[in-house]
Image (tube, rainbow, N blue to C red):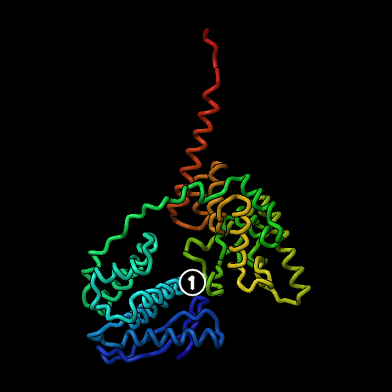
Amino acid sequence: MWIEKSRGRLRLCTRYKDPASGSLRKASVALAKDTPQARNRAAAALDLVVESRTSIAPEVMRLSDLSRYYLAALSREVKPTTMERNGSKCRTFLRIFGDVDVNKLTAGAVRARFFDYSDKPSTFNENLIRFKALLRWGYRNDLVRDIQFLEKLAPLKDDEKREKLEAKFLEADECAALVQAMTVPHWRDLTQFLVLSGLRIGEAMALTDEDLDFDRRLILVTKTLGHNTGIVTDPKTFASRRSVYMQDDLLALSRRVAASARRNRRILLLGRGQPLFAPLEAVTPYNAYRKYLRETSEALLGRSITPHVLRHTHASLLAEQGLSYDEIARRLGHGDSKVTRAIYVHVTERRKEKENERIRELHLVNFA
C-alpha cells in the first residue's frame, strides 16, 4: 500500500489481480489525514474494496457480507458522516433479520420483520427505503440474484400529524427571546451566529479565526465537522463551499468571537487553527450544544428546536427582508431545498397578506 496526494487530498492505494482478466488493477480510498489511526481505518476499508472486486458471487449471500461489500463501495464515494449513517443502518438490518441469506428473503418476511421492529409508519418507511437501496446495489453488482419481491413492498400511509411549516423556523421575536434566555456564553454566541449567517452547525463548528476575512467581510466556508465522527472534512456538497458576506450585526459578532478565541489560545498556549465554537470542556461539542438548545427552547418556547431550525430561520428572515429565493439559496450553499423553498413561499405569501391588510382600510380619494 502507498499514499498518493492529488489536488490537496490524500488517498491510500494498492494493487490487486483482477480475477476476470488476470491483470493488475489499482484500488484506492480517501485518507482523512496522515496519522496511524487514519491509515489503519483506511487500510481496513481498502481491504474490503479489494475483496469486493475480487470475490466471485457465491450461491449464498449473507446480509453481513452484502453490507461489507456495500460499505466498501460507498467508502470511495461518500464522506465519513454519510458512511457512519449507512453503517448504522446496516447494523440495524442485522439486528432485525439476523445474518440471513438475502437471496431467500420474501416480501412477507421483510414486512413482518420491519413491523416487529417498529410499528411506527415513519420508522417502517425509513427502514424500507434504506433496505431497498442496499439490495438494489447488490443486484446491480451481481451479488443478489433477484429483487423483484421489493416491488411488493410499499411504504405505509403515515397518518401522524405532520409538523407544521412554522415549526421549522423561528420568528424574529422568538430568536431574541431564545438568545436572551441562554446563560452559557459560547452557546449563546453560536446561536446568534447560526441565525445571522445561515451556516450549517457542522460548518460553524469547523470554523477558525483564519476563516474570517474581516477586510472583505467574508466567512470562508471550506469544511465541516462530522457530528458523529468528529472529523473535519470537505463541505456537504460542491455548492456548500462558498463565501458568506457578513452584514453589520454578523460582522460585530464575528469580531467578538474571534477576539475571544485568540485570547483563549494565548491563555491555554494553543496553536493556530483552533475552532471558534468548540469549548474545550465539551468532548462532543455538537451533542452538548444540541442538548442545551433543545432544553432551553422547550422551557422557553414549549417546543424542541434543533440547530438546523436556526438555518431555516435565517432563510425566513432573509425572505422577510425581500431577498429572492435564488439569493437565499446561494447564501445557504445549496442548489435547491424543498424546505427552504416552502419557507420562502410561506413568508412571501404572508407579506402579501400584510400588504393587503394595510391597503384594505385606505381611502385614496373621496369621490362623494
Residue 72 sits in quarter:
bottom left
Mark 1: few/some/many CA within 10 Å (<14, 14-19, 20+):
some
Q: Nearer the viewer, residue 53 or 185?
A: 185
The residue that appears at 23% across and 72% down in the rendered structure is 106
Residue 327 appears in view? yes
Left or right relative to 106: residue 359: right
Report the residue that reaches farthest toward the top: 368
Report the residue that reaches farthest toward the right: 267
Residue 54 sits in quarter:
bottom left
The residue that appears at 33% across and 73% down in the rendered structure is 134
The image shows residue 363 at horizontal and vertical percentages of: 55, 17
The image shows residue 175 at horizontal and vertical percentages of: 62, 49
Q: Nearer the viewer, residue 6 or 363?
A: 363
The image shows residue 285 at horizontal and vertical percentages of: 62, 69
Quadrant showing the N terminus: bottom left
Tell me the kind of residue under disc 1.
Thr
Residue 256 sits in quarter:
bottom right
The image shows residue 47 at horizontal and vertical percentages of: 40, 88
> What count of labels does the image hold?
1
176 w.r.t. 133: above or below = above
135 w.r.t. 350: above or below = below
Left or right relative to 185: residue 324: left
280 w.r.t. 291: above or below = below
State the SS at label 1: helix
The residue that appears at 25% across and 67% down in the rendered structure is 150
Q: Nearer the viewer, residue 200 or 123?
A: 123
Left or right relative to 339: residue 293: right
**Residue occupied by mark 1:** 81
Residue 245 appears in view? no
